[in-house]
Amino acid sequence: MKKIQVSLNNGLYIVATPIGNLQDMSFRAVQVLKNSKLIICENPSHSLKLLNEYDIKKKLVSIHDYNEEKVIDKISKDLSNSVVSLISDSGSPLVSDPGFKLVQHCIKNKIFVTSIPGPSSIISALQLSQIPMNHFTFYGFIPKKGKQAEELFCIAEKSVGAQIFFSSPHRLLTNLNNMKKYFVNRKITICKELTKINEEKISSTMEKIDEKIKNDNFNIKGEFIIIVEGKFSQETNKIDKKIVESLTNISKKFSLTDAVKIVHNLTGLSKKNLYETALKKIKNKNV
């Protein structure tokens, strides 16, 4: 590979790292980390495995929810005068990980901030889920407290598009049991250990997922990504009168194809069904 000279601005670099397979590290991410004065991470001992793989030897500063402000004070001069990288234990930083206050500090103080994109367990899971991903909502870890979890599910079950949750292993079955009350007859996919040798995923309906876990000997270890079909994903044939009126009105200002695309993006309804409905409307009008 041709060696590329790297010229970096002083400031903060939010660097995505592999979610499992260390070979998923991007060339640009390696170069940024090698040119950093220090690397902010969650767990230094965990991050060292990745850094040693790429022969990166830099000062590591641990950050978590309870020391973020102290870390900011400690490295404030470095942020202005050198290259500083932020990584998480895996994937893209700030997704259910610390660092939000750090980024806010940099933006508020006009310190250069940029993102070095890379692996994301959320996107990988969506791609494997067999659930439409033109719309999706990510909720992070399901709350441990029952009332908070119920409030979350109550909101999510009315939402358009795929609904994405994280779950710890010891709460997986409890979370699934609670979700059955809200996501009736929805498709569901559960993923774990993505990109690793022991990668696993199972898909079923919400009512049969327990049986699927048992029959497939699904190993309940590690952290899980749960993807549930959205409200309108299962209602693609239910195009009501208001939708038809909206489609008709929009098609007066746009082409039929564009009108279908607009309504599809707003509702998550099937493009095919919307297009067929629009054609029937036009045909009936011309009769």
Image: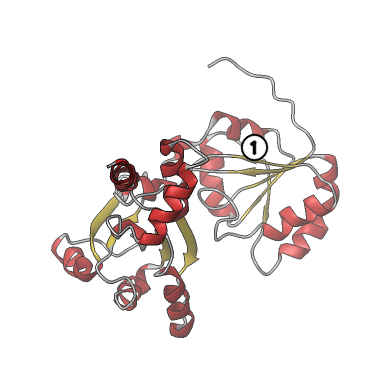
Where is 237 relative to 171, above or below? Answer: above
Residues 132 and 17: in front is 132
Q: Is residue 124 above or below residue 178?
A: above
The answer to whether residue 208 shows anywhere in this view is: yes
Residue shown at 51% from the left, 48% from the top? 91
Q: Position of residue 83 (x, y in %)?
A: 75, 39
Residue at the (41%, 69%) spot, across then down = 158
In terms of image quadrants, where is residue 234?
A: bottom left
Closest to the observer: 61 or 167? 167
Q: Residue furthest bottom?
A: 147
Which of the image's four quarters has the C terminus? top left
Residue at image location 53% in from the left, 43% down from the top: 17
Coloured how? secondary structure
**Is residue 262 left or right of 59 when viewed as pictured?**
left
Relative image position of residue 186 (x, y in whole percent): 28, 64
Instruction: Tally the numbered discs.
Output: 1
Q: Residue furthest front?
A: 287
Residue 234 shown left or right of residue 30 in the figure: left
Could you say where residue 155 lies in the image, as x and y percent from the top left?
46, 72
Q: Residue furthest top?
A: 2
The one of 241 and 15 positioned closer to us in this rendering:
241
Visible residue check, residue 189: no
- The residue nearer to you, when weighing 153 against 123, is 153
Q: Helix or strand or loop: what does disc 1 sit on?
A: helix
Q: Amino acid at mark 1?
A: Leu
x and y, in percent, of residue 194 in the image = 36, 48
Residue in the image at 49% along x and 46% along y:
250
Q: Residue at label 1?
A: 33
Q: Quadrant of residue 244?
A: bottom left
Tag 1: Cα neighbours inside 10 Å, few (<14), some, or many (≥20)? many
